[in-house]
Every structure is written in C-alpha cells, then in structure tokens.
Amino acid sequence: MDKIRIEAIAVQLVIGTLEHERVRRQQLLIDIEIGLDLKWAAESDDLTLSVDYSEIERRTVEIAENSSFYLLEALGGAIGKMLLSYDPVQYGRVSLFKAAASAAGKGVRVEMEFNK
C-alpha cells in the first residue's frame, strides 16, 4: 500500500479534561498517514487519481481548531472519519502529540488507525 504523510501540523485548540484546559487554547501537533494506491496517479500525473493533501491538511486544521473535545481520542476519531470519506483512501493513521499533557515527560502521543 502506498502512503502519503503530512507531518507536524501545528494547531491551537481547546482540548482536555482539566478545568484550565477548557479556558485557553494550547498547541497540538498532528501527523497523518494516508494509505491508498498511487499507481494510477503516478502513471498519469492526474490529481483526481490521488487525494489533495493540501485539502486534507486544511480540513484537519479546521476540525481541530473548531472543536472543543475533551479527549485526544475523540479528535483523532473525527480526523480519521474525514480521511476515510475520500474514495481512494483505504486506511488512515492519525497521531496527536500534546506536550502539555505530561508533567514529567515531553508529552503524550495518541496514535489511531482507521480502515475501510
């Protein structure tokens, strides 16, 4: 399976279960992996036989910045559902990194996979 990756999409959003997380935006980094067959796009140089990853990035930012989920898992689910709405996409992987979620470490990462 071929892949397209969009890495380190930085968004500012309200997310979390703690009281202080509900009143101010914080940064989250999102990585996306899109699994699809790119053979026909490679042979034809035709975007309609692939996916427009700039559109997927824009929609990811829109979903994240317009949301107010409590859980990273819920945000990941919304992004995964969006990825699978594209016909050629067979699977998606979403990785969400929240630096502010860890008191002793660099942060918390949630990774989710979605299949058609």
Image: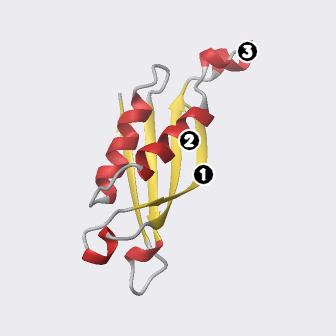
Q: Which residue is mark 2?
A: 57
**What residue lies at 34% left-to-right and 58% top-to-bottom?**
72
Mark 2 or mark 1: which comes first in sequence? 1
The amino acid beneath tag 1 is: Glu
N-terminal-most mark, 3 or 2: 3
Q: Secondary structure at mark 3?
A: helix
Whole-angstrom CA distance, mark 3 to mark 2, is 24 Å
Q: Quadrant of residue 108?
A: bottom left
Mark nearest the camera among 3 and 1 is 1
Q: Is residue 62 above or below residue 107?
A: above
Place of residue 82 in the rendered image (x, y in percent of width and height, measured from the top left): 40, 34
Q: Which residue is mark 3?
A: 43
Q: Is residue 68 left or right of residue 65?
A: left
- Gap between marks 2 and 1, in whole Å? 10 Å
The tag on residue 7 is: 1
Q: Could you tell which of marks 3 and 1 lies nearer the N-terminus?
A: 1
For label 2, the crowd category at 10 Å Cα-Cα, with few meaning under 14, some 14 to 19 and many 20 or more, is: some
Q: Split into 4 quadrants, where in the image is the C terminus? A: top left
x, y (%) of residue 83? 44, 34
How many other residues sit within 10 Å of disc 1, few (<14), some (14-19) or many (≥20)? few
Image x and y of residue 74, in percent: 29, 51
What amino acid is found at the position of numbered circle 3 in the picture?
Answer: Glu
Query: Judging from the image, what secondary structure is the residue with disc 2 in?
Result: helix
Q: Amino acid at mark 2?
A: Glu
Looking at the picture, tell me which residue is in the foreground, 51 or 4.
51
From this view, report whether residue 97 is shown above or below residue 50.
below
Q: Is residue 97 above or below residue 3?
A: below
User: Quadrant of residue 68 in the image?
Assistant: bottom left
Q: Residue at x 44, y 52 (%)?
A: 65
